Image (spheres, helix red, strand yellow):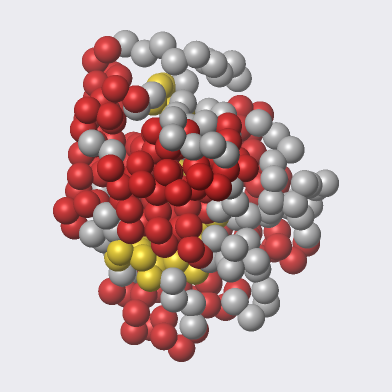
């Protein structure tokens, strides 16, 4: 499949995407949805601060005994398997089941899905629990689509996002989830339609947990518009990328970009979204 590499979009569609992205961010800010994150030790801080700076309310809660009381009250769930252990997996599964039964959307981040048989099996079992969105890098999405363990670079991708388009479409069709593939161009598909978000800067890959954090932001965006999950997912990816672009103008390196990324996400206004959002139809 040929993917357009340059941002060239007709004005009406570009305006539509900007309107959608701004409306969703504004709604997150006004409603402050409660987003439960069962995530890894490395990413907790940046994920929580990303949600707070966007206007959402994070809850980093993973104790199995608390889930029956807590999870049905949330607005969305984010499950990230980064530092996966046998002890945490039952809580991830139960939270996903409770969210699904309660009609709450949930997002799966299958970190390093193809790195080991244990990790792949766990991710495939979570996919069976009907995530609303699956967000990963190219290698993770390919591993899930194939259902096979493959040589990896740990949590880093060996594939560009555009290498994983067909795998993403296949996974979306098989799972019923919207599938997002992060990369230089973020790919989002429902199995037929494919869109690309072209925002962000390369240095964001030098900050740990930026991928995890945008997954949490996707959860916040879909929580306020469950009827348009593909659009909400693409909008979250674009808005997070815009924050990276804004932050990069003030940063001297990865550490300062991390700080300015959070500040920029907090400060994004309507004019910034309309002048920077770059979301295109790719098929």
Whether residue 217 is situated above or below residue 172 in the rendered picture: below
Give the quadrant of the N terminus.
top right
Q: Is residue 189 in view? A: no
| Count of marks overlaid on the render | 0
Q: Is residue 164 in view? A: yes
Q: Residue at x 62, y 42 (%)?
A: 206
Image coordinates for residue 63, horizontal then vertical, percent: 49, 83
The residue lying toward the viewer, choosing from 123 and 219, is: 219
Q: Quadrant of residue 56?
A: bottom left
Q: Residue at x 22, y 28 (%)?
A: 271
Image coordinates for residue 77, horizontal then vertical, percent: 40, 63
Whether residue 70 is situated above or below residue 233 in the rendered picture: below
Whether residue 163 is situated above or below residue 176 in the rendered picture: above
Q: Residue at x 21, y 33 (%)?
A: 270
The residue lying toward the viewer, choosing from 150 and 23, is: 23
Image coordinates for residue 170, horizontal then vertical, percent: 58, 38
Image coordinates for residue 140, horizontal then vertical, percent: 66, 47
């Amino acid at each position: 499949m040929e993917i357009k590499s340059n941002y060239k979009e007709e004005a009406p569609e570009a305006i539509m995407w900007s309107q959608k992205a701004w409306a969703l961010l504004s709604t997150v800010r006004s409603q402050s949805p409660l987003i439960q994150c069962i995530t890894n030790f490395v990413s907790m801080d940046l994920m929580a601060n990303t949600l707070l700076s966007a206007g959402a309310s994070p809850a980093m809660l993973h104790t199995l005994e608390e889930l029956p009381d807590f999870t049905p009250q949330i607005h969305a769930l984010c499950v990230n398997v980064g530092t996966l252990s046998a002890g945490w997996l039952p809580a991830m599964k139960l939270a996903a089941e409770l969210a699904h039964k309660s009609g709450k959307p949930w997002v799966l981040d299958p970190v390093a899905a193809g790195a080991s048989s244990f990790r792949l099996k766990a991710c495939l079992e979570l996919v069976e629990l009907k995530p609303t969105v699956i967000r990963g890098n190219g290698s993770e999405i390919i591993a899930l689509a194939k259902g096979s363990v493959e040589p990896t670079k740990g949590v880093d991708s060996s594939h560009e996002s555009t290498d994983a388009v067909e795998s993403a479409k296949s996974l979306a069709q098989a799972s019923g989830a919207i599938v997002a593939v992060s990369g230089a161009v973020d790919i989002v598909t429902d199995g037929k339609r494919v869109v690309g978000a072209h925002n962000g800067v390369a240095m964001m890959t030098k900050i740990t947990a930026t991928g995890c954090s945008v997954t949490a932001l996707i959860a916040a965006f879909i929580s306020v518009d469950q009827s348009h999950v593909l659009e909400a997912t693409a909008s979250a990816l674009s808005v997070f990328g815009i924050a990276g672009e804004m932050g990069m103008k003030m940063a001297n390196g990865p550490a300062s970009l991390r700080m300015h990324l959070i500040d920029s996400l907090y400060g994004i206004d309507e004019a910034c979204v309309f002048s920077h959002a770059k979301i295109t139809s790719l098929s």
